[in-house]
Amino acid sequence: MKYAVRWDSRTSKTLDRLPGDLYARIMRKLDALQEEPRPVGVEKLAGAENLYRVRVGDCRIVYAIRDRELVVIVIRIGHRREVFR
């Protein structure tokens, strides 16, 4: 079963501003989330019901999983200092 990965326009703008190499690494990770939304190294965020984060270098991808709909919703992408604010 493949999950659909979705994000909003704010996340799309964040992706557009990333350097090419980091953009490619994040896109590979997002593609991998289609196959396995809870890969090795993923952490469930404390205090949030369905939020997870995965690390890509100094960046973090925060996302929600909707298992019934087979959807991964990307909430934020950003540097580890800023993404959880």
Image (cartoon, grey):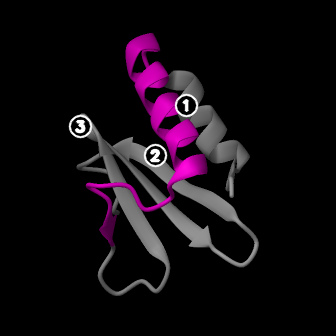
From which residue to which does the magenta span run? 18-44
Residue 55 vs residue 16: left or right?
left
Q: Nearer the viewer, residue 83 or 22?
A: 22
Taking the view exactly as shown, the residue that stands out farthest to the front is 1
Is any part of residue 83 visible from this angle? no
- The residue beneath circle 1 is 15
Horizontal and vertical percent for residue 54?
35, 52
Distance, label 2 to label 3, CA atoms, is 11 Å
Q: Is residue 54 magenta?
A: no
First of labels 1, 3 by sequence position? 1
Q: Which residue is mark 3?
A: 58
| Residue at 31% over, 51% down | 82
Could you tell me which residue is drawn at 39 percent across and 43 percent down? Answer: 78
Q: Is residue 58 toward the left or the right of residue 20 in the image?
A: left
Q: Quadrant of the C terminus?
A: bottom left
Q: Residue at x 34, y 87 (%)?
A: 47
